[in-house]
């Protein structure tokens, strides 16, 4: 089967859906002739022109508010925000408007607005280009929050995002954008709320998010040499969260570690831990553990940057500690 | 202006529907029937009326915390506005919104907002949809002088201007944001001029003169539909009641003389006098409307106060589309 990068797979999803549905348009800085800061729209401007590939001024609140109104009036905007850090300028529009319109209109208005762009700590991007912030979005009723970790999932989840009528925050970790995976030519969709068991195992469950999936798999590979068997789950979407798959796994393994680059307090690990404690308490043979990024702004210098993100060695150690409980 | 008598009278009736609905709401607020806020539009009726008379149900209106008049003028029945403020399931937002969150997309009332500013951006987005779908509709934002100092104003006007979007920005200068005078909050109070600095059409109009508003809006809407871009209407007006029901009518920010001077320029009273004076309508034409509107308000009030509350079991419905 052919292989595509994460970015190419997501772009293919966008191209297919734009060809199919003329009400889809993309806004962002550089999404026109330039083809997107991360090559998210390469080749599309030539096909669809400026009304559908709309270069914007640097006006994050403005174009997100504008797209909110557009989504309420029959079109399907895609906001290509480059770095999630930039849409913090639009938090009021996102939380007070985008997330609430369907509810406040009792379902008479839809909000088919997809916001996509990069997250994550990588490449000395420093603190205004390294955020992830997905726990903030997960906390708000009304958002779908999608964190794909490979090209195959990126395409299938993006297709689902573009077909749906809900606001979707589609977050693409910078460290994963050039990673290749097999992507079939045939059309497919991946529903929201379906976690992937990316490695089967018996002794503990590791739920990993975003770029931590790859690192956790590396850690488990290293441990496999010692005969240690760990199950790894990639939730793929954080809202909705497929807690059933996690509970089933914990039922089998009795132990749970959540690995997440973002901050621990009120994070996705805290949520998963609370739900497993509530609904899987009898299955647990050890306290639930979390391994998170350091609770600090993201520093620039490579040794400092590396120090705030969980690495494979730390994941291995966290698993050993969990098994020793 | 070449309106038919029926059209002239329709403007009168629409303003009166807003006025009587809100007088009823103010009373209901005092009687404890409204559990939350109530921001009346009394004194500003000519603006919503004059603008919305140029719109169809497909044109999208976005408004703000002082939105009863916009909703009514766009075609939301008074009974649904009253029921909404009473928190009833028959309200236009099914009891989920109250005074500041009126939704009736079936008539193009796309929502009012408890946050000052976003309506400016959303109307710009409706203009974008109109262009992309090529359906000839316009987006309309109603907002106050206070909102014009918010970043949404700058961002929305700039986007609408650079892309020639069919949007009408209706700036309602009632001179105060809560209790803060507009002249305190900005150096340049000439909003038509500010609009022109964005490269868009800016028009000043007497916001208490429904015909002047109607005419200015008609020209703006015509331009927008013809692909000639956005217009800002700078409407000078006054709110004669308190910022919000239950707050003092005068406070420390204005005088009784000022309120009385504006009351003497009441948009409904002056329009009625003009209709009579110019022989467009007779006293009995107006009285017939007065009575019909009063009956509508009485019946709407009965409907609203006898309507059931929403079922708590439905509280988490419609967060998502499915
Ligand atoms: C973003 C935001 N900040 C503050 C408020 C509180 N607030 C509600 S109405 C208002 C004044 C608005 O003034 P203006 O825009 O002139 O409208 P008016 O009330 O005069 O109709 C304020 C400050 C709010 N609702 N939203
Ligand atoms: Mg004001």
Image: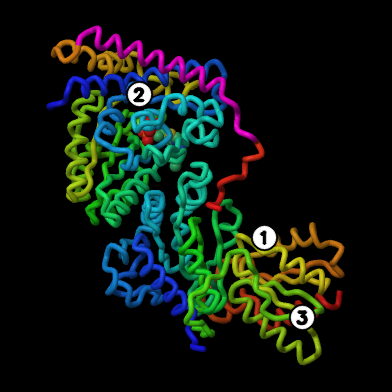
Say which mark, if any, is on residue B239: 2
Q: Are marks 3 and 1 in contact (CB under 8 Å)?
A: no
For ligand 1, tell me if the residue under mark 2 lies within 8 Å.
yes
Q: Residues within 10 Å of mark 1 (few under 14, many from 20)?
A: few
Placement of B272 over or under B173, stated as above or below: above
For discs 3 and 1, the disc positioned in front in the rendered view: 3
Residue B131 makes an appearance in the image: yes
Does the magenta-highlighted stretch encompass residue B286? yes
For discs 3 and 2, the disc positioned in front in the rendered view: 3
Does the magenta-highlighted stretch encompass residue A13? no
Q: Are marks 3 and 2 in contact (CB under 8 Å)?
A: no
| Residue span colored magenta | B282-311
Closer-to-camera residue (A8/A35) = A8
Closer-to-camera residue (B34/A37) = B34
A307 lies left or right of B82: right
Closer-to-camera residue (A164/A243) = A164
Placement of A94 over or under A191, stated as above or below: above
Residue at 76% across / 87% down in the picture? A223
Residue at 31% across / 41% down in the picture? B140
- Position of residue A168 measured from the top left corner of the image (x, y, whole percent): 50, 60
Q: Which chain hosts label 2?
A: B
Say which mark, if any, is on residue A265: 1
Say which mark, if any, is on residue A201: 3
């Amino acid at each position: 089967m052919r292989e595509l990068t994460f970015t190419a797979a997501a772009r293919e999803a966008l191209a297919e859906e734009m060809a199919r549905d003329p009400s889809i348009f993309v806004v962002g800085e550089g999404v026109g002739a330039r083809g997107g800061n991360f090559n998210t729209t390469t080749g599309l401007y030539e096909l669809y022109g400026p009304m559908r590939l709309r270069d914007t001024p640097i006006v994050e609140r403005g174009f997100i508010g504008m797209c909110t109104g557009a989504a309420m009036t029959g079109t399907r905007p895609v906001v290509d925000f480059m770095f999630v850090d930039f849409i913090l300028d639009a938090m009021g529009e996102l939380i007070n408007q985008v997330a609430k319109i369907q509810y406040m209109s009792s379902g008479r208005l839809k909000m088919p607005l997809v916001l996509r762009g990069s997250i994550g700590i990588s490449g000395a991007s420093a603190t205004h280009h390294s955020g992830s912030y997905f726990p903030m979005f997960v906390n708000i009723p009304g958002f779908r929050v999608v964190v794909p970790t490979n090209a195959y999932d990126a395409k299938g989840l993006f297709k689902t995002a573009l077909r749906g009528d809900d606001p979707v925050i589609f977050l693409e970790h910078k460290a994963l954008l050039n990673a290749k995976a097999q992507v079939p030519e045939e059309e497919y969709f991946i529903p929201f709320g379906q976690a992937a068991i990316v490695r089967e195992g018996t002794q503990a469950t590791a739920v990993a998010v975003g770029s931590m999936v790859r690192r956790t798999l590396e850690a488990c590979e290293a441990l496999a040499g010692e005969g240690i068997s760990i199950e790894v789950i990639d939730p793929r979407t954080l809202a909705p969260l497929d807690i059933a798959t996690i509970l089933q796994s914990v039922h089998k393994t009795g132990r749970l570690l959540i690995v997440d680059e973002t901050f621990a307090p009120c994070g996705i690990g805290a949520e998963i831990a609370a739900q497993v404690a509530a609904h899987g308490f009898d299955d647990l043979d050890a306290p639930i553990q979390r391994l998170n990024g350091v609770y600090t702004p993201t520093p620039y210098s490579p040794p400092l940057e590396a120090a705030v993100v969980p690495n494979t060695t730390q994941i291995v150690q966290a698993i050993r500690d969990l098994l020793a409980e | 202006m070449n309106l038919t008598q029926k059209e002239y009278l329709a403007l009168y009736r629409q303003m009166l529907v807003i006025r009587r609905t809100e007088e009823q709401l103010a009373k209901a607020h005092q009687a404890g029937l409204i559990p939350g806020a109530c921001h009346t539009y009394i004194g500003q009726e000519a603006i919503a009326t004059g603008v919305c008379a140029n719109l169809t149900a497909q044109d999208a209106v976005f408004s703000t915390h002082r939105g009863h008049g916009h909703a009514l003028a766009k075609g939301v029945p008074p009974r649904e506005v009253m029921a909404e403020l009473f928190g009833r399931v028959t309200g236009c937002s099914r009891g989920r919104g109250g005074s500041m969150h009126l939704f009736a997309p079936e008539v193009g009332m796309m929502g009012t907002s408890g946050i000052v500013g976003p309506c400016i951006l959303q109307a710009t987005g409706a203009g974008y949809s109109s262009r992309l779908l090529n359906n000839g509709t316009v987006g309309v934002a109603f907002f106050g002088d206070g909102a014009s100092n918010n970043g949404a104003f700058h961002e929305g006007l700039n986007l609408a201007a650079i892309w020639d979007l069919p949007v009408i920005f209706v700036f309602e200068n009632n001179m105060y944001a809560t209790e803060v005078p507009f002249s305190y909050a900005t150096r340049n109070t000439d909003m038509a001029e500010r609009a022109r600095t964005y490269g868009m059409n800016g028009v000043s109009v007497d916001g208490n003169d429904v015909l002047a508003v109607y005419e200015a809006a008609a020209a703006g809407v015509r331009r927008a539909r013809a692909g000639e871009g956005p217009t800002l209407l700078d409407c000078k007006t006054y709110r004669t009641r308190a910022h919000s029901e239950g707050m003092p009518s005068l406070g420390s920010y204005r005088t009784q003389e000022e309120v009385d001077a504006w009351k003497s320029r009441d948009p409904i009273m002056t329009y009625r006098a003009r209709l009579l004076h110019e022989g467009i309508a007779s006293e009995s034409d107006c009285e017939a409307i007065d009575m019909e509107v009063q009956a509508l308000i009485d019946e709407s009030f009965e409907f609203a106060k006898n309507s059931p509350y929403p079922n708590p079991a439905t509280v988490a419905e419609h967060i998502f589309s499915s």
